[in-house]
Amino acid sequence: MRYPWLDEYLLAKPGVTKDLQPEWNWIRYKIGDKMFAAVLLNENNKPYYINVKLDPLEGEALRKEYTGVIPGYYSNKRHWNSVLPDGDVPDALLRSMLDESYRLVLQGFSRKKQREITGQGAP
């Protein structure tokens, strides 16, 4: 995989945990109980996709621009996108996609819960 920084980058975000979903062999990155990214592993534990949640229009545009971005594998194809771990997506773009996925999932929580997750006090 050409993104060796991915695990450290995601775990540095406030409130992020990871687990292995053994039935699917996915390493899931979650905020609370909600997944915002996943590394999909094959039978040899080699990554074959990285799943991220994006705004549908952004995801569609990226799929047109990069062959390494496809509709989400085993996921809602409108909101989730899969990135090939050895594809043509630049590191900076993948970081941006991961940041956006985190932001989208985080905003699904109440404001109070968002503050708890991010460690920010009341506004």
Image (cartoon, rainbow, N blue to C red):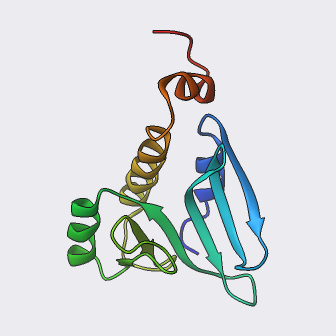
Nearer the observer, 47 or 119? 119
| Lateral position of residue 101 relative to residue 116, left or right | left
Residue 9 sits above or below residue 64 on the image:
above
The quarter of the displayed image where residue 26 is located: bottom right
Nearer the observer, 37 or 65? 37
The quarter of the displayed image where residue 45 is located: bottom right
Q: Position of residue 106 (x, y in %)?
A: 49, 40
Q: Position of residue 23 (x, y in %)?
A: 76, 79
Image quadrant containing the C terminus: top left
The quarter of the displayed image where residue 53 is located: bottom left
Residue 90 sits above or below residue 112 on the image:
below
| Lateral position of residue 123 relative to residue 8, left or right | left
Nearer the observer, 110 or 19? 110
Residue at 66% in and 46% down: 11
Residue 120 sits above or below residue 71 on the image:
above
Nearer the observer, 77 or 102? 77
Q: Position of residue 110 (x, y in %)?
A: 50, 30
Image quadrant containing the N terminus: bottom right
Residue that protrudes farthest toward the bottom in the picture? 43
| Lateral position of residue 45 relative to residue 88, left or right | right
How many marks do you count on the picture? 0
Q: Position of residue 9 (x, y in %)?
A: 59, 48
Residue at 27% in and 62% down: 56
